[in-house]
Amino acid sequence: MPLARRLSALALALLGLSFASCTTVGELEPRHRLRQPSARARVLVQSAAARVQPEPQPAEPAPKAAEAETQPASFQTGDVLAETATDTDAPAAGPDAPVDADLALAATAKETFVFATPSWRSKKIGYLRGGAIVKRSPEPVTNDGCSGGWYRVAPQGFVCVGKHATLDVNHPLVTAAARRADRQGPLPYAYGMSAFPTPALYTKVPTRDEQRRVEHDLGSHSRKPPDSAWDDVVYEAIPEMIRDGRQVMAWNGVRHSEGSLYTGRAIPKSGFAFLDFFEHEGRRFGLSVDLDVIPLDRMRRVQPSAFHGLSLDDKTSLPVVFVMTRGAHLYSGDPRTTGLTSVRPLAFREALPVTALRVKRNGVGYAQTTSGEWLKEENLVRVEPMRQRPGWATDGRSWVDVSILKQALVAYEGQKPVYVTLVSTGADGLGDPKETHSTPRGQFLIHTKHVTATMNGDELGDEFDLRDVPYVQYFQEGYAFHAAYWHDSFGRPRSHGCVNLSPLDARWLFHWTDPPVPQGWHGAMSLRQGTLVHVHP
């Protein structure tokens, strides 16, 4: 098989990942024939069409040099050009070009793929999530194989208008999915985890009698005080598509039958992202991204971890220590002469830059901070500068270093460290990834990124179903960097093999690495231009 064809086949396989370690559930097919959109959804869509702008990006990394086959994205603007855009109908690639409703294309499937060239046989370079609106060329570049026409979209690639995309930004499906993932938030959506007993996944807004038929403990359950954690979400009118007892239409395009009430119950370790919140007959519900109607009193509100790493620059650099105990203190004075006086308590996992000076007095080791203070070395994770320059640490190249033993990650630009944090790698440490929950070691390239992706596992006794896991970046088969909204154990091994980060750290890393996910897109991939990842003991 020619090399180009093998790469294309591999590209298709990578974007639809489904592996045992951090299993990604592929997105489903589109819905259609939704009811008239609500006024709120229409406002959201009109707002999106008027101002689809790339979100602010971190300023540190510089754009990378282009290679022969594929040009990488500009990290500053998010612009990517798979080929030279000579077509005068091509959309402007600049970061400040707004989307005119008359020059917009909207996704009508949960995955609307973007192709490198206007052909179904071309490689997929990313996808839009249903409801997304992007800028397009005024006219189709061709109608070959696509009755609605292939349009060039910003900032690169081509989309076929038809089953999965439309030129009508007020299309009912677009308005139904008008709430977009917030790529600037620690979590892109509001999230909840299943409580016990787990919630029913309703196919409509159930009446009180219908709830009693499904939830046999509803009487006693209703007497419990509601969870105040859900008080601060915005409750609005019931979404138009499920108002007046109408059934939900699933993403596969089929509306649930009138006799349908629920599709089952969530498993105990389940997480859900929500598009809308509303009240009905005195009970609060959420409409999930997967279009399930879920009672919120069966869910625990996710409060994302506040932990995050430390940005590094010319003034603040490695070595850095993380405090891995509670009750530690920062001291003034000098352990070698005057003794020490407590200055303040240190927060758990607090990061402090330190000098190379380390002393021991009375069997206790001390590290000196760059500000001249001291802390005890017990229960510290110390991240040192690299001792030897690896061959890939060339000027201008970004790469990520992950230490399994230290549970630490350092992002580099060439030889310069720019960010350091704690992570959670595979629970089985340095074991064999094929036999245990361990993270693979070696050098890899980030090849596929999703703003969110669903992950699940059916291992007996360890089943999980985690919807819309944020900031997912695959670097080797089913292994990825991603945020974890279901735990706060960063700094300790925990995962099934992926590298878990706090939501704040995962967001930072997602925006920093290549391939970038352009504004308005939900996923992107590149087999050759991804950021290098080095995982070692």
Image (cartoon, helix red, strand yellow):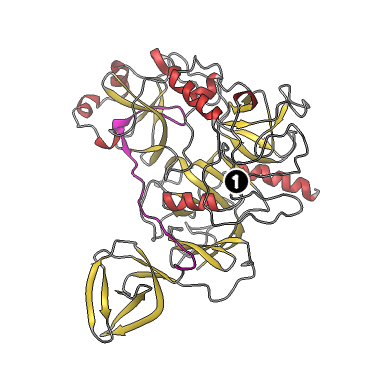
Residue 284 occupies which quadrant of the picture? Answer: top left
Q: What is the x, y in percent for residue 217?
A: 24, 27
Q: Residue at x 50, y 46 (%)?
A: 471
Compared to residue 315, the image places residue 145 above or below, namely above
Compared to residue 206, the image places residue 295 above or below, namely below
Position of 31 with respect to 272 (left or right) is: right
Q: What is the x, y in percent for residue 77?
A: 60, 46
**Which segment did they paint magenta?**
287-315
Q: What is the x, y in percent for residue 231?
A: 27, 33
Compared to residue 88, the image places residue 484 above or below, namely below
Amino acid type of the residue tagged 1 in the rendering: Thr
Residue nearest the observer in this picture, 364 or 432: 364
Q: Residue at x 52, y 17 (%)?
A: 34
Q: Is residue 308 magenta?
A: yes
Q: What is the x, y in percent for residue 113?
A: 64, 35
Residue nearest the observer in this picture, 52 or 198: 52
Residue at image mark 1? 77
Furthest residue in direction bottom, as rendered: 337
- Residue 342 visible? The answer is yes
